[in-house]
Image: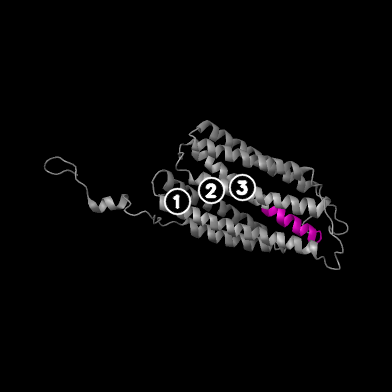
Amino acid sequence: MTNKNNLPTFNLKQTRLSFQFFPSHLVDRSIWPLMVSSSLFALVIGTVQYFHGYSTGFLLLKAAALLTVIGAAYWWKDVVIEAAFKGHHTKKVRFGIAQGFNLFIVSEIMAFLSVFWAYLHASLSPSIEIVSWPPVGITPLNAFAIPFINTLILLSSGGFITYAHHALIANNRKATITGLFVTIILALIFTFLQYVEYNQASFTFADSVYGSAFFATTGLHGAHVLIGTIFILVQYLRITNYHMTNGHHLGLELSILYWHFVDVVWLFLFCVVYYWGGTGGSI
């Protein structure tokens, strides 16, 4: 639109639609939060039905898991667009996201505290039916076989992702990409070795309280490793597509925080579940 002097003029009402006048960001309407929350609810129901032998349980579990992944992926895509292309993630918005993620980590600590509590309660105060720990008939895994190798792998991955972070701050793009790529490879190796370990175990989830507590703790951690791997992979793809700078890379910082949390939990898990509660310790 121009005036009589052929100079450009602006419609203030239209300008307000594309210009942010305040530091906070009001998100657009989206179907993804409703879809993810509903599919997660269905996932819980399907899991419970599957554990109790209902024929429809496994089908509901698979359908709900697929919808959860799809909804989360599209929701995450919208957040990336807000940050990288629309410029909505101001300093105040990033601070709010970081604080929200910190509270999420606190909730994760509580989740792992519950499974560790269950394991220690069963091992330190065994009932008369258990008598000893591990219970009679249970052959625990060797802590210095695959678990020890996985400890070295996971700690190494934490070092590489920290190296990638410092490289990004120093504007070393090649080193950043290399560090993240190696981290992802190590995470995949960790997951594969844990799969091999589960296949080698002489007990199952249903073999006394030891089997339930063991697979609850290690399985919960394994799920977090998978989620963390996807988290880091997304940051790797974003960096290769020039979405981040040395001063604006909140997504990478949060993925690093999450991965270090996974590292710390594994150290506790190795010491308590594998070493003390297995071959290295006894009641």
The answer to which of 166 and 250 lies nearer the viewer is 166
For mark 2, what is the residue? 254
For mark 3, what is the residue? 260
| Tag 1–tag 2 contact (CB < 8 Å) | no
| Tag 3–tag 1 contact (CB < 8 Å) | no
For image coordinates 68% across by 62% down, the residue present is 114
Amino acid tagged 1:
Arg
For mark 1, what is the residue? 94
SS label for mark 1:
helix
Question: Which class describes the residues within 10 Å of circle 3: few (<14), some (14-19), or many (20+)?
Answer: many
Amino acid tagged 2:
Leu
Residue 184 % position (x, y): 61, 39
Q: Magenta part of the protein: which range?
A: 207-220
SS label for mark 2:
helix
* Corner quadrant of residue 2: top left
Amino acid tagged 3:
His
Q: Is residue 29 magenta-colored?
A: no
